[in-house]
Amino acid sequence: MMLVDLKKTWKEFSEIPISSDDEIEQDFYFWEKGTCRFDIWHWFDEKLPDGIAGWIAL
């Protein structure tokens, strides 16, 4: 996945409702409703060149 696609996907993820249990409340790409948002964050962290911390700092 290219960086521009990751940026788009991250923005879309920011719009996904999250439950009080930190789970997404609707399917999102290949993650099913009920997936822990931290699992998705870890996926992004692995894909981004400088991880999420480097991405958010931009």
Image (tube, rainbow, N blue to C red):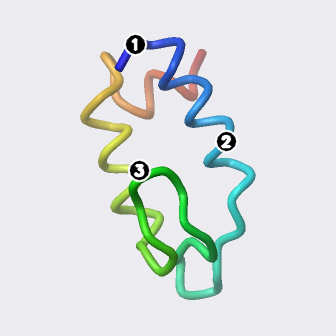
Q: Position of residue 1 (x, y in %)?
A: 35, 20
Q: Is residue 55 above or below residue 46?
A: above
N-terminal label among 2 and 3: 2
- Amino acid on which the number 2 mark rests in the picture: Glu
Kindly identify the residue that appears in the image at 67 percent across and 35 percent down.
Answer: 11
| Crowdedness near tag 1: few (<14), some (14–19) or many (≥20) residues, C-alpha within 10 Å | few
Return the residue at label 3: 41
Label 1 secondary element: loop
Q: Position of residue 37 (x, y in %)?
A: 47, 64
Label 2 secondary element: helix
- Left or right: 15 in relation to 7: right
Kindly identify the residue that appears in the image at 51 percent across and 76 percent down.
Answer: 33
Label 3 secondary element: helix
Kindly identify the residue that appears in the image at 64 percent across and 86 percent down.
Answer: 20
Q: Between tags 3 and 1, which lies in front?
A: 1
Q: Position of residue 49 (x, y in %)?
A: 31, 16
> In front here: 29 or 17?
29
Displayed quadrant of residue 32:
bottom left
Tell which residue pokes out farthest to the bottom in this image. 21
Q: Is residue 17 above or below residue 7?
A: below
Q: Position of residue 55 (x, y in %)?
A: 50, 23
Kindly identify the residue that appears in the image at 71 percent across and 68 percent down.
Answer: 17
Return the residue at label 1: 2
Return the residue at label 2: 12
> In front here: 32 or 17?
32
